Image (cartoon, rainbow, N blue to C red):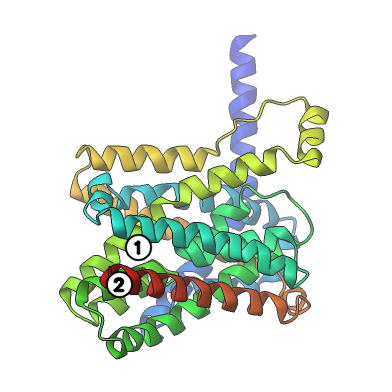
Amino acid sequence: MLRLSQGSYWHARSDHLVRLWPGVALCAVIALAAVFVSGIHGGPPMLYGLLMGAAFHYQSHDPRTAPGVDACMRVVLRLGIGLLGARITVGQIESLGWATGLIIVLAVVSTVLCGVLVARWLRLSWSMGLLAGGATAICGAAAALAIAAVLPQDEHRERNTLSAVVLATVLSTVAMLLYPLVASALALPPLWAGVFLGGTIHDVAQVVVAGYSLGQEAGDTASIVKLLRVSLLVLVVLVISIVVGRLPSKVLAKKATGKFSFPVPGFLVLFVILVGVHSAGWMSPSLQQSMAATSRACLMVGVTALGMKTSFVGLARTGWRPAALMFITTVWIALFVLGAIEAVMHF
């Protein structure tokens, strides 16, 4: 009897993997094509993945590929976010000093709050405010995807997430080109120029490009400051997860299902564990590089699936308000960090 039950279990699991395979393979192929196009023409690979995935939106409704696309958007994407922890150590964060750390923490908190308040002013949902504020404050597309993973499921979540990811990527690219000119015009020293770039530009890749365009010291500082912002992702998402879990509708849903739900998302646990392992020196450089590459691959596949799940026709119906929201939060964090730097330099 036990052998029969085990055989039935593995047979069911294999059938499930067979159902997922077409959609997963499609997402992987489109993601590879996006990376290839990005390598030839330049530009953010995630943006190409979103756009190319959206061209195959009809496949997200096809019974043959829909299960795999859903799995990529949920499981693969969250795995990529969790593996980001392999890039960060506690020592890197401590090397910044308390003043820089305080500036970044206050900038992140105030920007998330700014997103929620401005969303309310623009008559957008509070969830859109969290997505915009979190994407701007922490690490662009990856933060928006992580926050979306713990938000309540509704008919607007995928569309709002895609809006935040696309706008964060576009604004991050503009900031990559503009902010080094701002730092030079203000005659910021290399250290503080790095703090400004690392503390304000959305995506990691753009921070690296902008930072090293001003020299080695500015580039190193910008990279570490950016990693500090990424490390705050776990705290922000955890707080949002706890708050969402206490919403009345969410409580009723848990009671109705009768299932136990772990209060901390699994990908956040993985993130924290990897930060600890890397900080303790238990991770070899080759393993760290492998995990970083795996994280990028998972994020690309997950973002491609997100693009496939969302129609740009529906995205266009959101109007100008999400763009205005993202622009305001981007300007807010830039002015906040610049003001804090000027205050510290003249203290």
Which quadrant of the view contains residue 278? Answer: top left
Q: How many marks?
A: 2
- Residue that lies at the very extreme toward the front in this rendered image: 347
Residue 113 shows in the view: yes
Mark 1: which secondary structure?
Answer: helix
Q: Can residue 52 be seen?
A: no
Q: Position of residue 83 (x, y in %)?
A: 40, 48
Give the amino acid at mark 2: Val
- Amino acid on which the number 1 mark rests in the picture: Lys
Residue 295 x, y percent position in the rendering: 40, 54
> Residue 25, percent across and down?
54, 58
Pick whichever of labels 1 and 2 is earlier in the sequence: 2
Q: Which residue is mark 2?
A: 208
Instruction: Rate crowding at label 2 as few (under 14), some (14 to 19) or many (20 or more) other CA atoms within 10 Å.
Output: many
> If the image is split into quadrants, where does the C terminus sit?
bottom left
In the picture, measured across the screen, residue 30 lies left or right of residue 280, that is right
Q: Residue at x 71, y 82 (%)?
A: 320
Residue at the left extreme, as displayed: 216
Q: Are marks 1 and 2 in contact (CB under 8 Å)?
A: yes
Relative to 20, residue 334 above or below: below
Q: Is residue 140 above or below residue 23?
A: below
User: In the drawing, what numbered circle is on residue 226?
Assistant: 1
Report the side of 97 relative to 56 (left or right). left
Measured in 3D between alpha carbons, the distance from the residue under mark 1 to the one under mark 2, in whole angstroms, is 9 Å
323 and 141: which one is in front?
323
Query: x, y (%) of residue 322?
Result: 68, 74
In the picture as drawn, the residue positioned furthest to the top comes out as 1
- Quadrant that contains the N terminus: top right
Q: Image point 41% across, 76% down: which residue?
A: 36
Q: Nearer the viewer, mark 1 or mark 2?
A: 1
Identify which residue is drawn at 51% across, 57% down: 109
For residue 90, what is the image quadrant? top left
